[in-house]
Amino acid sequence: MAKPRVGIYGLTSCAGDQLAILNCEDELLTLVSKLDIRSWVMAQSINDEETELDIAFVEGVVATERDLNTLKDVRERAKILIAIGTCAVWGGVAAMKNHLSRDRMREIVYGDRAQHIDTQKALPLKAVVDVEYELPGCPIEKHQFLSLVGALLHGDFPEFPQIPVCSECKMAENECLLVHNGEVCCGPLTMAGCGARCPSLNVPCVGCHGPVEEAHYNANYRALRAKGISKDDIQRKMGIFASPAWMPKVLVTDEPLGGNGKGKDYVKTD
Amino acid sequence: MSKQISQSIDIAHLGRVEGHGGIHVEIKDGEIKKVDMEIYEGSRFYETLVIGKHFTEVPPIVSRVCAICSADHTLASQMAVEDAMGIEITPRTRLLRGLLLHGSMIESHALHVFALALPDLLGYPSVLAMVEDYPDEVTAGLGLKKLGNIVQEMIGGRAIHPVNAVVGGFGKVPSKDELADLAKQLEEALDKTMSMVELIGSLELPDYSDPSNIYAALHNEEERYSYLGQWIFTSTGEKKPIHDFREVCNERVVRHSTAKQSLYSDKPFMTGSLARININSHLLKGRAKEALEQLLPEIPDYNDLHNNVAQFIELIHSVERSLVLIRSLVQDPLEDEEPIRQAVRSGVGVGALEAPRGSLYHYYEIDDSGIVTDADIITPTAQNLANIEKDFRTALTQKMGSSKDEIRAHLEMIARAYDPCISCAVHLVDVEFK
């Protein structure tokens, strides 16, 4: 069987997901021998940007015209497009303040002589193109990436269980930081895969893998409020990762959510 | 011959660097008209993202500025927040942070020297293409990179975007057994790294020395080669406290880049491994000192392309220094201690450290409820951009009349010698910019 033609791309990002791939030191040489890597600008200087691709991995958000064009071009050439990392899947940290004017943000950071700098609302890939698979994580977990590639090489469907960090935390027999310490822990709402890394270190989950499917937003919001945590504290903490995914669903009003439709707008966090 | 030369060179997307950048050069009638290090990485506006956040939430946010330097951004922001709040960390936290910083340095330098720069110098398109001819070197390089990650995983809880390092201390402390095992791996790595001194010494690097170059690095009062310091030293003999970092990095916005550029006294300067070696190498000890004497016998070294050699020397230093820190750590019992948290107070704080690519500054203003009201992050690559352009000019002047391909290769080599971290450099920001 011919090796699949692969492209690895980074849009606006910290390059953490590509680095996570490079960090598969023990597997990297095997990995490379199984794939025909046609483009990986971060790792090689000769890249083919014309070829059809069997698999394209894309990290980062669409935040410039250049990102948009790259993504559309890759989409056209790729049979399977895979969003890697929480930015590509949900918008991540970059989308945290999408409710604010980009012009204003640019002015605060660069001053008033920077209109030439192109900036757009930070969007996840699926807001712009169709995506076959998504692997969240900030950064992605190495073992999940390798099992994803393994599944594709064997003609299988890559799948990751839709369970929250809380489940992994219970399996690790950690004391609950929310129940015992009253800390805002995003574990109940966040997609697992990390092995409950943070709570196992006595550090509350910040939600870096983005939301798990069918999370119980309302119940968790009420549980946090019942611990005496203010709405502001909950909003702020939950507004760090995957904010556009979470904010419309929860934390819109101080009252338990009643589905009044107001949740469609992103909440202003400051 | 060179008088009639007119050409333009565009390197649209610089490979083997982190982030999105390119080089644009215009030469008319033998005269250099334009030399731009273009940066088109999109902006994420971190200084606005942290405004309105609680000070404990800042490190996990700004860590995402850049994956390769995520430990450095985490630590610099923690130090800045603690400075603002008057939080005094324990001696053990200091040791653990030092170890984390060395882990980051080992990972980043190994990645850069072996996977990104060495292919240039040996004539390969990537490290993966080198495997067949240089299997031992590639394996050793990847092994070192992995070791840097092991340190970051053990101390920081994760190799990229550390989670265990928090404001005031650490979530959990590694056990003595874990540290003993790490020390063993570091000992082995030290020997392996020393065995590559010869290879590094045999590399033929173009000479673009310029004695008018300016270098800047942090300097530690304790008079040891450290990535932490209370002072900024420049090769022009100036000494400034880190709180005055803006006097060294005067930032400006340029049309061809989403990253700002820094000038010192209106002149470009270099920060990073070579700058640190030029300013602090008399403090190196042990095998790092041996490697220095063999590889860079003349200090100051004004050839910026030697930055990769300086990184290699620092790799050895970081491995050695990690061993010293582990020895200090295991002297006392290693029980978990709660991170230091005290009553919130308002304040202004600066955190500075030497990241792999140079001096990194974080600045925060915090109100009396612990909420961030202003922020400023100045990254090493932003400081280096103007100097990279200066070095391009030096190379172009020397290479005038050479083939386009040769010039192009040399420009790429210069850019990569700096190990630019473009994600970092973008939106670096001075709110006061006028």
Image: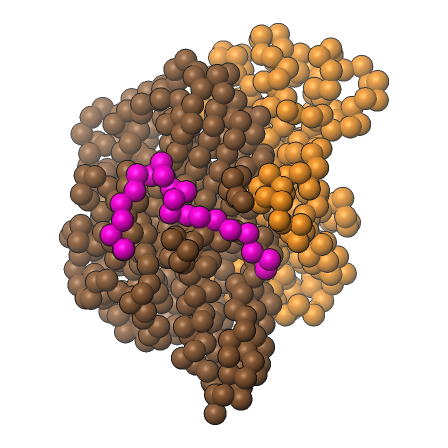
Chain colours: A orange, B brown
Q: Is residue A84 left or right of residue B74?
A: right
User: Would residue A261 be seen by someone viewing this image from the given angle?
Assistant: yes
Res B210 quadrant in image: bottom left
Instruction: Tell me what residue is drawn at x 58 percent, y 45 percent.
Output: A110
Picture coordinates of residue A97, whole percent (x, y): 66, 34
Res A221 quadrant in image: top right
Give the residue furthest to the right: A260
In this rendering, the answer to whether B19 lies above or below B363 is: below
User: Would residue A84 be seen by someone viewing this image from the given angle?
Assistant: no
In this rendering, the answer to whether B190 lies above or below B374 is: below
Picture coordinates of residue B49, whole percent (x, y): 58, 34
Picture coordinates of residue A226, whole percent (x, y): 62, 7
Instruction: Tell me what residue is drawn at x 47 percent, y 85 percent.
Output: B402
Q: Is residue B346 magenta?
A: no
Q: How many marks?
A: 0
Res B156 quadrant in image: top left
Query: Which sits in the foreground, B100 or B366?
Result: B366
Q: Which residues are magenta?
A: B236-256
Query: Which sits in the foreground, B184 or B217?
Result: B217
